[in-house]
Image (tube, rainbow, N blue to C red):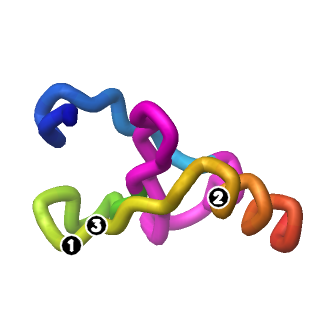
Amino acid sequence: MSTDSQLEWFKSSYSGSEGDDCVEVALVPGAVRVRDSKQSDGLRFEVASPAWAEFLGFVG
């Protein structure tokens, strides 16, 4: 499993372009890790790839 320091985090396109309230995601095999860009050392969570795709379909 990849450590967070090895991951390539990127701002979610669903975060918008204004303000600092952004969600960052990193792709790992079979899952997506999610964190708050303002607290990159804070809490994160991991979601299975199919669940993340379903979520994006719902919010998009």
| Residue 36 coordinates in the image, percent (x, y) | 35, 66
**Residue 30 visible in this rendered orientation of the protein:** yes
Q: Secondary structure at mark 3?
A: strand
Q: Secondary structure at mark 2?
A: helix
Q: Residue placed at 48% from the left, 48% from the top?
A: 32
Q: CA distance from mark 1 to mark 3?
A: 4 Å
Q: Give the vertical position of 13 relative to 28 (above or below).
A: below
Q: Secondary structure at mark 1?
A: loop
Nearer the observer, 11 or 18: 11
Report the mark closest to the observer, 1 or 2.
2
Q: Residue placed at 44% from the left, 32% from the top?
A: 29
| Residue 23 coordinates in the image, percent (x, y) | 48, 61
Residue at the disc numbered 3: 44
Q: Are marks 1 and 3 in contact (CB under 8 Å)?
A: yes
- The question of residue 60 being in magenta is answered with no
| Residue 16 coordinates in the image, percent (x, y) | 68, 58
Magenta-highlighted residues: 13-33
Type of amino acid under label 1:
Leu
Nearer the observer, 54 or 14: 54
Q: CA distance from mark 3 to mark 2?
A: 14 Å
Write down the quadrant of residue 56 in the picture. bottom right
Type of amino acid under label 3:
Arg
Write down the quadrant of residue 43 in the picture. bottom left
Q: Earlier in the sequence, mark 3 or mark 2?
A: 3
- Disc sitting over residue 43 in the figure: 1
Residue at the disc numbered 2: 52
Report the mark closest to the observer, 3 or 2.
2
**Residue 36 visible in this rendered orientation of the protein:** no
Q: Is 24 left or right of 48, judged from the image as shown?
A: left
Within-10-Å neighbours for mark 2: few <14, some 14–19, many 20+? some
Q: Earlier in the sequence, mark 1 or mark 2?
A: 1
Type of amino acid under label 2:
Trp
